[in-house]
Amino acid sequence: MLTDFNPKATQAWEQLNGLAAKIPEQNVADYFSADPQRHTRCCIEWRELLLDYSKNLASDQVLSALLALAEQTPLRQHIDAMFSGKRINTTEGRAVLHAALRDPGNDNYRVDGVGVAPAITAEQQKIKDFSERIRSGDWRGSTGKTITDVINIGIGGSDLGPKMVCLALQEFAHPSLSFHFISNVDGAEILSTLKRLDPETTLVIVSSKTFTTQETLLNTQTAIDWFRRELSLEKPQQTSHFIGLTASRENAEAYGIPADQIIEFWDWVGGRYSLWSSIGLSIAVCVGYDRFTELLDGARAMDRHFQDAPLAENMPVIMGLLGIWYSNFLGAQSTAVIPYCERLSLFPSYLQQLDMESNGKSVSRSGEVVDYNTGPILWGQTGTNGQHAFFQLLHQGTRLVPLDFIATVNDPLSNPEHHRILLGNMLAQSAALMAGQKLEGTPSHKIYPGNRPSNVLLLQHLSPFNLGALIALYEHKVFVQGSIWNINSFDQWGVELGKKMANELLSDTGDGMEGFDPSTRRLSDYISSKTD
Ligand code: F6P
């Protein structure tokens, strides 16, 4: 399958260690003085995206050594293996083919020699039909009224992707449909939402790859009870108020969702990569099927760039390598993504699942414990808000936090004055973090050490195409890192133990707390004793 290897055994890793030792004596600003062309050389312009990575704490020697690391590991082989449908998710025995979803009709995507294109085309046709019927008013509730409110019930990848994209593309949203995303098992979320809605005109999209997820099934049950109560329906889940999106038709049907109201996807689409599949139905309903396909087109274009561009001009490769530099050689524990665009406010939380569920691993592909850092803690929120919250630490704190600033050059939803000030702030922050300030005689609390690295990523417009490309860019960045760290980026066994223990704790056999530690037992007793 995939060649097992140890990245630390490469010559490049050793060289990078040597280069890292010299970093305390270096200044990013000096790289610019040494090379007046650095800002154009350390920059990749691709279609309507521009990545400026010149403000990184990485000299030319470091950048060359990072590229050598990519060459000396089987990154290229891994990329080919993913796109050719090999079962690279070995612990689950699955292929990883979300890229096929954004290239419908391409017969080259195969799992065990069987093409996936016909199945994709058939399900995409359903996304088209369903979304057009809902948008046009043709899809009606059980009392014959057209739909005004769509609730997506799902969690993790069955929530974060569609929710983030619907917000990001609000410029194109249907004028009279409202969208509600319910994920948390906290009943206050769904109950307060349902209170505001009219059941006659509400459609519930149950999004779950497995159709077994506790939170999603409980929220769905609460919605079913609401319809039953409000509309006197015996089995609301069997009416036009419910659609199921799943890789387990069997489970969705067993739950009562009518067979012709289910849109499927497949086990080779990971949950956190599923917004391109039927899980994207709420996106298609929100912005229209044509815009949904533009989103897929943008991601496909990024797939091609990732596959074809030379490593030195390859955006995901460069971003992935810089992340490795900070994590493995300069000791960074976290990385932050700061979109200077309020419509991208959910992008950091979307990326948290993408990055941390993918690369938060500590064993190699062959199951050995690795002795180097893997995925960083990813966090962030929009600028300028972040400037008034955590930027103090970024400028003067003791930790190294590499940043990605993201912005759109044009924003038709803003006005020139707001937008000029927004982008001005972003450029100023990125410049200030790098340059710092140490004026003669300045008291130490007013010193800015500078030398704090950032990428700036500009999108000419926040179009569906560019957003698709942006998301795929981060997917592939995560892939590059997982490949070089020799870990499986596509499983998520780490989430299982907590789920299992919650089931044990909540079991109604009476001995649910047996086997739990004293602290947890005491907390549980406290909750029971203080419950009103
Ligand atoms: O618990 C983690 C996880 O399995 C994610 O990977 C997934 O996106 C989420 O739960 C939801 O799963 P499902 O779509 O099967 O309900």
Image: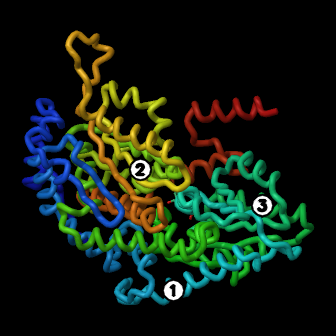
User: Quick check: 414 above or below 151?
Assistant: above
Marks 1 and 3: which is nearer the front? 1
User: Observer-nearest residue: 93 or 380?
Assistant: 380
Q: Quadrant of residue 143?
A: bottom right
**x 77%, y 60%: residue:** 223
The alpha-carbon separation of the residues under discs 1 and 3 comes to 31 Å
Residue 113 location (% of width, % of height): 35, 89
Do the residues bearing badges 1 and 3 touch, measured as CB atoms within 8 Å?
no
**Which residue occupies the foreground of this view, 363 or 249?**
249
Q: Secondary structure at mark 1?
A: helix
Disc nearest the viewer among 2 and 3: 2
The residue at which mark 3 appears reads as 223
Q: Residue at x 48, y 29 (%)?
A: 388
* Relative to 528, 270 lies left or right: left
User: Going 35% across and 43% down the picture, which residue do you hit?
Assistant: 335
Say if mark 2 contacts mark 3, CB within 8 Å: no
Which quadrant holds residue 225? Answer: bottom right
The amino acid marked with disc number 3 is: Ala
Mark 1 or mark 3, earlier in chain: 1
Residue type, numbered disc 2: Ala
Q: Nearer the viewer, mark 2 or mark 1?
A: 2
- As drawn, the label of residue 121 is 1
Q: Which residue is mark 2?
A: 407
Q: Is residue 444 left or right of residue 357?
A: left
- Residue 16, compared with residue 47, is above or below; it is above
Mark 2 / mark 3, whichever is N-terminal: 3
Residue 93 at x, y percent in the picture:
39, 73
2 or 1: tag closer to the N-terminus: 1
Q: Is residue 114 above or below residue 508?
A: below
Point out the residue furthest to the right here: 232
